[in-house]
Image (cartoon, coloured by chain):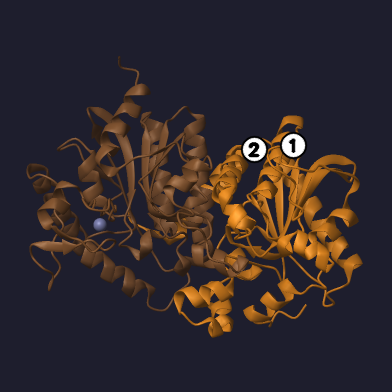
Amino acid sequence: MAKELTAAQRVALARDPRRPSPEDYLHGLFTDFFEQRGDRLFGDDRSIVGGIARYHGRPVTVICTRKGKTLEEHLQAHFGMPEPEGYRKARRLMEQAEKFGRPIITFVDTPGAYPGLEAEERGQADAIAQNLARMSSLTVPFVAVICGEGGSGGALALSMGNRVLMLENAVYSVLSPEGFASILWKDSSRVEEACEVMKLTAQDLLELGVIDEIVPEPEELESLGTRLRIMDAALTKHLDAVVRLKDPARHRQEKFAAMGEAWIRGGKT
Amino acid sequence: MSQLFENRRARFLELRLRRKGSGVPFAPKPGMDPLFDKCPQCGQAVSKLDWQKTTGVCPNCGLHRPLTAYQRLYTLLDSGTFRELNPTLTGRDPLHFPGYKEKAAGLHSRTGLGEAVVTATGTMDGMSVVLAVMDSRFLMGSMGVAVGEKIARAARYAQKKKLPLIIFCASGGARMQEGILSLMQMAKTAAAIESFQKSGGLYISCLTNPTTGGVSASFAMLGDITLAEPRALIGFAGPRVIEQTIGQKLPEGFQRSEFLQEHGFVDAVVPRSEMRETLVRLLALHSKRR
Ligand SMILES: [Zn+2]
């Protein structure tokens, strides 16, 4: 893959609808998938799909975001923006994985949490916060993969893995570049500049210590077979490593406690 | 660095001085009416003395004006017990974002704050606590690496010393100027709170205007007990973003403290005048001393 792409070009690639979706990885790499629906509190959010499956024979819990492929599916899933029920369903499945000792694998591609009226009413902030807290203490190994857009807290709420992998042309950021430009510069036309400044590419995040490995991508967007092979190799390698961790919860606590520590001045205690 | 200590000392002296007076002084800005200060909500002319007596609550309409972190600490802690934690901890500029360093330095010299949160220990009615108080004057109280680190350290300190933790949130969310590392502070703070709570620690979260974005979706919503000041804006997405998404105006009172309580996310809406006694009561209910 050409390495000379600009950040803005990668943002466009990350959002390209022809790009294989998290569900393509789910159906291509896992067998015996049993979907579990609903948060047991209010409803079932179609922008998150999760359940039990086998990965190379081993039972795992797998959770994917979902943008949908048809217009009807897009609308159903708010173009991949989860509501609180989606995050609470994910938490329910994670807690169940912990109970039965299954590793957790997530595939994330979302512009962010859905900013709707009902989503707020039903506690979007609460749903995300509870996921973050709970993910930090799960006793089972956890690998997260950012496949396309890693949009803000809505993506982080599914991504606190012992290992966080990222596809070469995926992006992961505190806010969309459009939002960033309009908030900081009050000028939504400076999106391209925002893409550069924000440091949202896989290479940037690897250097900042936010992710653990970049999963290479072939040139053609639709080359699903090649993509599955590369993803399989990366996932196998990291899953094998994390299942050997003595204390995955502690590992995650320490990993996220160290985020950004190189960017602090002073404060010895 | 010596400038930093200079400012700290000035702040500290100010805090000590205030303890001797009554109420919280709202220093008049240049060009302001020296005696009266109009309420920004109802327009009523309220005397400076009354603002002091009510610690920034409008006697006419009940508006709770923002308090600085040091004013808030003054209203809560027993006299002479304030000890700041990590006073010199500040952030840097991971994105080399144009103008960010200068802006932070300017705010520092104007407010004496090293960052958007002040963490401290002290006692309330004789009971030791760890407090973290955000200050919206510093880049809207946004959470960058330093804020996340100070919150996480406060939680770890409380865990180590087996003390209750009280956090006063006031924040627009993640610090955009620090990019993805700000987002990661949500994970860091939530993990530190989770570990503290699992160890048996009591965490009381106090939501003040505004508590939104990445702060609301991390430590703010994780309290064992969640209190809110009246009419504070609390939510994940900002009202304007929601209006754009759904294409209609939001109802009056949406995302306010009372709305959150009605929907099950806040234990109690507590006016500022009752905040200290409420916290003291809750601390006593969790205290081993009889
Ligand atoms: Zn008023």
Instruction: Return the residue nearer the eye: B181 or B268.
Output: B268
* Tint of chain A: orange
Circles 1 and 2, Cβ within 8 Å, touching? The answer is yes
The furthest residue to the top: B290
Ligand 1 visible in quadrant: bottom left
Q: Is residue A232 left or right of residue A127?
A: right
- Residue labelled with disc 2: A138
Quarter containing the C terminus of chain A:
top left
Does the rendering let one see residue A234? yes
Dot 1: chain letter: A
When asked about the image quadrant of residue B3, the answer is: bottom left
- Residue labelled with disc 1: A97
Instruction: Return the residue nearer the eye: A107 or A111.
Output: A111
Q: CA distance from mark 1 to mark 2?
A: 9 Å
Structural crowding at the residue carrying mark 1, measured as other residues with C-alpha within 10 Å and reported as few (<14), some (14–19) or many (≥20): many
Structural crowding at the residue carrying mark 2, measured as other residues with C-alpha within 10 Å and reported as few (<14), some (14–19) or many (≥20): many
Percent position of residue B105, x then y: 29, 69
Q: How many numbered badges does the structure rendering display?
A: 2
Percent position of residue A89, x then y: 71, 43
Q: Is residue B115 left or right of residue B55?
A: right
Percent position of residue A252, x then y: 60, 44
Does the rendering let one see residue A68? no
Tell me the amino acid under the disc marked 1.
Ala
The residue drawn where x is 26% and y is 59% is: B113
* Tint of chain B: brown
When asked about the image quadrant of residue B122, the answer is: top left
Asked if residue A80 is positioned above or below residue A245 in the image, the reply reads: below
- Does label 1 or label 2 sit earlier along the sequence? 1
